[in-house]
Image (cartoon, rainbow, N blue to C red):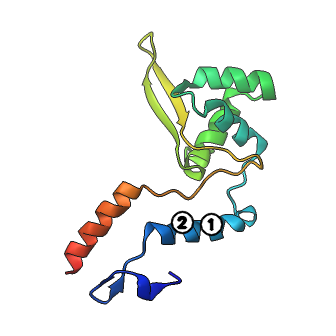
């Protein structure tokens, strides 16, 4: 908040704007190369394959990564879900989702989807803001404070 006196004041508090968020994100992204959002080539391959395809069954992901990278299903599960199921890549990347559902034969199947984007250098967009949610929460907060 570089221009704090230009912000709306509620009680003793100044309210930041979406513009403030955008400015902070731009500052962060200029130094993002030093942060831990750099993906390994295998992680980039997983996200690239799943990106924009809706729900991709694990079997399809395993077949692709097996052919292209020689990865086995156990390796892929470890990369995506972690060694102890602690969500390795799932925790690392916003918008990457795993969900269990029944396949067309009625058998349980894990599906993956990714709604984000991958930059050429293997980084992903880690800072996002839902403008509608931010506005709604700001209004709720202002009512609570007053």
Q: Nearer the viewer, residue 41 or 66?
A: 41
Query: In which image quadrant can residue 62 be found?
Result: top right
Q: Nearer the viewer, residue 63 or 31?
A: 31
Position of 84 with respect to 121 (left or right) is left
Q: Residue at x 35, y 55 (%)?
A: 132
User: Which percent across, then down, holds residue 12?
Assistant: 31, 90
Q: Residue at x 54, y 32 (%)?
A: 112
Query: In which image quadrant can residue 65 be found?
Result: top right
Q: CA distance from mark 1 to mark 2?
A: 6 Å
**Disc 2: CA contacts within 10 A as few (<14), some (14-19) or many (>=20):** some
Q: Residue at x 44, y 9 (%)?
A: 105
Q: Nearer the viewer, residue 102 or 78?
A: 102
- The residue at which mark 2 appears reads as 22
Mark 2 and mark 1 in contact (Cβ < 8 Å)? Answer: yes
Position of 7 with respect to 67 (left or right) is left
Q: Secondary structure at mark 2?
A: helix
Q: Residue reaching furthest front?
A: 6
Position of 92 with respect to 99 (left or right) is right
User: Which percent across, then down, holds residue 8?
Assistant: 34, 80
Q: Quadrant of the C terminus?
A: bottom left
Q: How many marks?
A: 2
The image shows residue 44, relative to residue 32, as above or below, that is above
Q: Secondary structure at mark 1?
A: helix
**Which mark, by number, is residue 40?**
none
- The residue at which mark 1 appears reads as 26
Q: Nearer the viewer, residue 128 or 100?
A: 128
User: Which percent across, then down, holds residue 73?
Assistant: 67, 27
**Disc 1: CA contacts within 10 A as few (<14), some (14-19) or many (>=20):** few
């Amino acid at each position: 908040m570089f221009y704090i006196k230009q912000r709306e004041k509620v009680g003793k508090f100044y309210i930041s704007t979406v513009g403030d968020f955008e400015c902070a994100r731009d500052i962060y992204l200029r130094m993002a190369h030093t942060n831990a959002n750099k993906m390994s080539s295998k992680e980039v391959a997983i996200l690239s394959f799943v990106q924009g395809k809706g729900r991709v069954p694990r079997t399809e992901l395993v077949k692709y990564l097996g052919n292209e990278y020689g990865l086995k299903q156990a390796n892929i599960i470890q990369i995506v879900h972690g060694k102890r199921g602690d969500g390795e890549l799932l925790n690392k990347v916003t918008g990457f989702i795993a969900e269990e559902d029944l396949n067309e034969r009625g058998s349980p199947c894990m599906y993956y989807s990714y709604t984000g984007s991958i930059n050429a250098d293997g980084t992903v967009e880690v800072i996002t803001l839902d403008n509608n949610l931010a506005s709604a929460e700001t209004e709720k907060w202002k009512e609570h404070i007053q």
